[in-house]
Image (spheres, grey):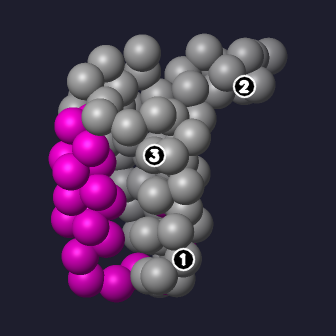
Amino acid sequence: MRAIVTVIGKDQVGIIAAVCAMLAENNVNVLDISQTVLQGYFTMIMLVDLSGCSVPFSSLAELLENGGQERGLSIRIQREDIFNAMHRI
């Protein structure tokens, strides 16, 4: 299964490293990544592969959300099929 991870917050050193470390610790593979900084705000969208994930999806979502809060970021994960359904025109 694949999922979309979004990260938004004030730009700071180490955001990509921190998010990738949280994913790697749970055996989640990053397939694609797009990031930018706009007027001091960092935004990132990642496509990830959850097929080898070592924890349930809900636990991973909570881990990412809590890790983001510790850094002043909003980190969310959503299953790819749900993301696509919500953004279909």
Based on the picture, tell me whether residue 37 belongs to the magenta stretch.
Answer: no
Residue type of the residue flagged with mark 1: Gln
The residue shown at (25%, 24%) is 52
Question: Is 13 or 75 nearer to us in this picture?
Answer: 75
Based on the picture, tell me whether residue 19 belongs to the magenta stretch.
Answer: yes
**Side of 33 where 40 appears, left or right:** right
The residue shown at (34%, 84%) is 12
Instruction: Categorize mark 3 by other alpha carbons within 10 Å: few (<14), some (14-19), many (20+).
Output: many
Question: Is 62 or 32 nearer to us in this picture?
Answer: 62
Contact? badges 3 and 1 (CB < 8 Å)? no
Of circles 2 and 1, the one toward us is 1
CA–CA distance in space, label 2 to label 1: 26 Å
Residue 54, x across and y down, in percent: 29, 34
Mark before the other along the chain sequence, 3 or 1: 3
Quadrant hosting residue 44: bottom left
Q: Which contiguous range is marked in magenta?
A: 7-28
Residue type of the residue flagged with mark 3: Leu
The residue shown at (44%, 82%) is 71
Q: Secondary structure at mark 2?
A: loop
Give the labeled residue for mark 1.
69
Give the labeled residue for mark 2.
87
Residue 68, x across and y down, in percent: 48, 70
Question: Is 46 or 78 nearer to us in this picture?
Answer: 78
